[in-house]
Image: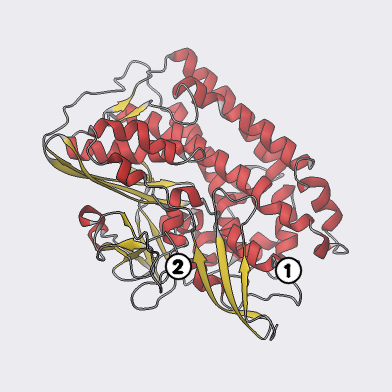
Amino acid sequence: MSDTPRLVVGPFNRVEGDLEVHLDMADGRVAAAQVNAPLYRGFERMLEGKDPRDALTITPRICGICSISQSTAAARALGAAMGLAPTAQGAGIAALIQAVENASDHLIHFNLFFMPDFTRPPYAGRAWHARAVDRFTAGEGGAQRAAIEARAGLMHILGLMAGKWPHTLAIQPGGVTRAPDARDKLRIAVTLRAFRRYLETVVFGAALEEFIALETPAALMRWDRGDAGLFLEIAADLGLDDLGRGAGRYMSFGAYPLEDGPAFAAGLWEGGLQPLDPAAIAEDLSHAWMLGQTAHPFAGETRPDEAMRDGAYSWCKAPRLSGQPVEVGALARQVVDGHPLALALAGGGVLARVAGRLLELARTQILMERLAEGIDPTARFMVQGAVPEAGQGAGLIEAARGALGHWLRIEGGRIASYQIIAPTTWNFSPRDAAGMPGPLEAALVGVPVAEGEETPVAVQHVVRSFDPCMVCTVH
C-alpha cells in the first residue's frame, strides 16, 4: 500500500444517504480516517420562524426510516416547552409505535444492509460462504425474503395506531391521536405473536428468553441456531470482535419514556454507569463546513459555510459530551441498561455492535408484548395544551441507531431556533478542535486493507456495524 497513501471509499451502497470515508494508509492498515457527510440538507433552517407545531409535520420528513423517532423527539421538545406531558396510556402507545419502528429497523439492517457483505467473492471458500449466499444474497436470499414478510406483518400495528408510516402525526405532546379499543388490543397481540414466531424460528432458532439469558461472550459464541448463529460463526472465523473496536464510552438518553421512567435506562457508561447531564452537550464546528462557535444546542445555530473552508471536511458537526466523543446505538443502550452480555461486550467492535442489536431486538419484542398487554381502552390517551409565546424544550429519545435530540426555542410564538443531533451525528462526527476523532474515525484505525482493494471489505464491516443514516446526520 506504499504507493497508495490515501484511499477514498464511497459512496457506499446500502447506506441511507451519502457517505465518504478518506483513509490514510500505512503498512496495509488504516492509520487515520476522515468521515465526510457530503450532503447538506438544512431542515433546522427550514423550521425557523414557523409555528412550533409545524415541527411535528416537518421533522419526521428528515428520514423515511426513523420518522417516528423524529416525530417522538419533536413531540417531547414541544411538550417540554408547553409544560405538557403525555398521559400514561398515551406514552405507552407512543412507545409501542416507536418500538415497532426500531425493531423493524434492526431487522432490516441485519438482513438487508449488514449480512449481504459476507456473500461477496473474497469470502468464497470459507466454510460458511455457501450458506451466507443462500440466506443473504441481495434480493434473493431466503433470510431477506422472510425478513421483509415479517416486517410487513409487524407494520400492521403502525397502520392501526399511527395511521400511516412513515410521517405519522399520531404522536403529539399530550399523547396519541388514536385511542385503541378492545378489538385493537387483540389485533396488536395477535400481530406480536406472529412476529415472535418469526424471530424464534428464523432469526434466533430458539425462544427469545434463551438468547436474552446469555451473559458472557463465550456463551454467546456457542449459540449456533438461526441466522444469529450463522452470523456468530462468521464473526468467530473473521475475528470480528477485534475489528473496529470502540473506546467503551457509551451514552443513552433512555429509550421509550413511560410514566415511571424509560424502558431502557438513561446514562453514560465509561467503566461504570454515571448520570447523564444533557447540559454538558456541545457541538464543535472546527472541522465542519459550518459557521459559528462551539455551543450547547439551545445556543447553537446552523449556518453553512458556503466557502467550504480549508481544514473542514464534512457538513456534519462534532457533538461532544463534556468534551468527549461518545458511541451511541443499540449496544450503548444495552450497556447503559446493564444487561450482563452487553456489559461483557463493552469496548468491542463489529461483533459487539451487531450482537447488541440482536440482543435489543429480542428484548424489544418482550417490551412490545408488555406494552400491548398494558393497554387500557377505557383510559385517556391525549391531553391538550397551549403553545407559549416564549419558552424552550428538549426532546431526548432513542432512535434505532442511538441518541436523538431535538432542542426547540420559541420567541413571539414562533420557532426562534431548532437544533437536532441525530445518532449518526454522534457516531460519524469529524474531529473536534482538540483533534479528537469521532467514534467511527477512531474505530477505523488499524483496520486491514488488502493490496488492490478499492472498497475494502473490512472497512465496510466497521462502517455498517454502526448502521449509519446519513440523511439524518446533517440538517
Q: Nearer the viewer, residue 313 or 469?
A: 313
Residue 65 shows in the view: yes
* Residue 455 image offset from top left, x and y in percent: 69, 65
Determine the secondary structure under disc 2: loop
Look at mark 1 in the image and give the residue it sits on. Answer: 238
Residue type of the residue flagged with mark 2: Tyr
Mark 2 / mark 1, whichever is N-terminal: 1
For residue 352, side relative to residue 322 (left or right): right
Q: Which picture quadrant has residue 314?
A: bottom left
Which residue is located at x 33 percent, y 15 percent? 378
Q: Amino acid at mark 1?
A: Leu
Give the SS element for disc 1: helix
Query: Residue 463 versus residue 85: which sits nearer the camera?
Result: 463
Neighbours of disc 2 within 10 Å: few (<14), some (14-19), many (20+): many
Q: Is residue 384 left or right of residue 425?
A: left
What residue is drawn where x is 42% and y is 55%?
Answer: 337
Give the alpha-carbon distance from disc 2 to disc 1, as whole Å: 32 Å
Write the residue at 65% across / 62% down. 461
Disc marking residue 313: 2
At 68% from the left and 68% from the top, the residue drawn is 458
**Crowd around label 1: few <14 · some 14–19 · many ≥20 (10 Å):** some
Residue located farthest toward the right when viewing the structure as drawn: 125
